[in-house]
Image (cartoon, rainbow, N blue to C red):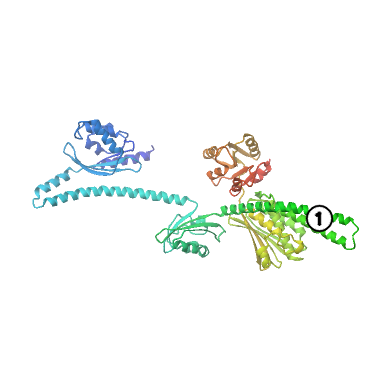
Amino acid sequence: MDISDQRVKAMTTAGLNLIGQALSIYDSDLRLAVSNARFQEMFGLPDWLVEPGAEFSETIRFLAESGEYEPEDDIEEIVRSRVEQALAFEPHYIERVRPNGQVISVEGAPLPQGGWVAVYTDITATKRVETLLRARSEELSDQLLTHAEELSATNRELAATITALEEAKRQLTEIEARTRLTTEMMPAHIAHVGADGRYSYSNRRLSAVMPGRPSDIVGLSIADALGPSAFARIEPHLAKAYGGQNSVFEFTEDHDSRRIRASFTPDGSGGVYILSMDVTEETQARVALQQSRRRALAAQMTSGLAHDFSNLLTIILGMQGKLEKMNLPEGASELVEATQKAARRGGRLLNRIADMTGSRTLRPVATDLHGLLEDLRLLASPSLPRAVGLSVLDHTPDEALMLDPGMLQDALLNLVLNARDACGPSGQITVSAHAVGRIWVEITVGDTGPGFSEAALEKAINPFFTTKGSEGSGLGLPMVYDMVKLAGGDLRLANTPTGAAVTLRLPYRAAPRAAGGLALLVEDQEDLRAQFRDMLMDLGHSVIEATSVDEACALAADIDGIALVLSDIRLEGAATGLDLVDRLSPDLPCILMTSLPLSDPLHRTALGRCPVLRKPFSRAQLSALIRTEAA
């Protein structure tokens, strides 16, 4: 105990000793926790019975043997019954006369942590006054005196009740404080608006869920707190809740295009409880999963058809080859050649369909977007006519992002070539890129061509729709759309004052910043663990190892300075690598690795949570992901 604790204890003891009443506090084990000097004096207790830890039963036995309780025929029975009453302690107020003639009141109240506090007050003088009043006031009726005595007793009981209510109020205040702290720690905005549309409660998390809004909103109207645009989106659902119906919905707010899920619940008294949270990452993962399922379904539908159609094309080409060798009349050779060209074009179309519906797996790695856009300029420029210019406006942040550079570059090159075709012999193509908060990365390819037709705006992402006639396959934009959706993003087509624009919106995923330092490796197979340990050490990391989630969490709690976690998804025990990510600090960079197929639910869920390495992988791949240089 330090000096400050000793001082507080001494002051507490001195204060209790100044009280004119006797006081004792026993814990739930019926051992003395605190008493004052008046308690010892009133009952003549020896020192050892007023020391902390003294047993209640021993105190009762001493008092019984001292004649405190009558009759004294069976002391053990007195001790047993009093101990039973103490174990089932209830609030009470009683008055009793001691053997020495002293009249005391006993007021007891339980404590929330267990045990109880008892206060003993000497009311002998009060009782004497009451007796004297009865003896000397013959004019007063016996009924009036009785009422006076009852009123005095009632007042004492009322004082005891007030004390109990004050203790209950204190406990309720503590519960309210804990509840408020809990709600303020939740990653969601919890609030209540009254019938007048003004906030009566808020856990101060609105600005975290919807940046740009205030935190202190109690007393504000919901329209002023959210702003005109967001309020317009939620107003119909709020009106529905005011009408007594629950409402759960999602909307995209304007500040940085976050996806917000809100729940409105009527409170039964004209107000509405509100729960809102940022579900942007969940939405991105859901979009990616939906696209994967669509692709799997498309692959099932087209694989058999493509196989049979490929056989038919092979037969057609074979027959045309035989016809070509025959002596055909004039003009027949041209027909044979045209038929062969059409069959070969059909074969190329089948190959593109296979590419689109086949096993194209998104493989995000730490990508320098500045370098990718500069490479796009170098790749696209030679294919453009002299009078068609290409500008790249790069306003993206200076940090590596988790992207699939190959698929993204293919998609952008496809859009640039489409823009070239739209411009004709002269024009301007502009590729611009910027971040929307830390939620999205937007890349727009615009041109000065004639723009999209109404039909193109509606159907351009549908497979086989083309405005290029026989020169187009109608699969370019659908493949770009497929890539964006696999990443959890979206694609928008629009006409501008100068032409057309296609915008790719991709999730903003910063690559882990770990570079050297201590790495926590979590892998339950010993031979693989040794292999990954060597990779990490070659990349400049010192390594600690675990085989299960519980072991990894224990190490993370006990060891400071862990800069990186590399974990398998399937581990020893029931918990997975996803559980480990949930239990670790969100600021600790985590990379998951797996040999599970992309169709496995765990693999798909992991892709939406953090970077994932597909086993087997090389040291160079690991190095690219954690942004360290390969040895």
Which residue lies under the disc numbered 1?
A: 316
Q: In the rendered image, which quarter contains the N terminus? A: top left
x, y percent for residue 92: 26, 44
x, y percent for residue 65: 22, 31
Decide which of 431, 475 is in the foreground and name it. Answer: 475
336 horizontally vs 479: left or right: right
* Residue at position x 90%, y 63% in the image: 330
Decide which of 250, 504 is in the foreground and name it. Answer: 250
Can residue 276 be spotted in the picture? yes
Can residue 371 be spotted in the picture? no
| Amino acid type shown at disc 1 | Ile
244 horizontally vs 104: left or right: right
* Residue at position x 82%, y 57% in the image: 340
Decide which of 109, 39 is in the foreground and name it. Answer: 109
Q: In the rendered image, which quarter contains the C terminus? A: top right
Q: Quadrant of residue 449?
A: bottom right
x, y percent for residue 231: 50, 63
Q: Seen from this angle, which residue lies furthest left? A: 138
Q: Quadrant of residue 36?
A: top left
How busy is the neighbourhood of tag 1: few (under 14 within 10 Å), some, or many (20 plus)?
some
* Residue at position x 39%, y 38% in the image: 2
Decide which of 209, 110 is in the foreground and name it. Answer: 110
- Number of numbered discs on residues: 1
Tag 1 secondary structure: helix
Q: Is residue 52 above or below residue 170?
A: above
* Residue at position x 66%, y 61% in the image: 502
x, y percent for residue 186: 48, 51
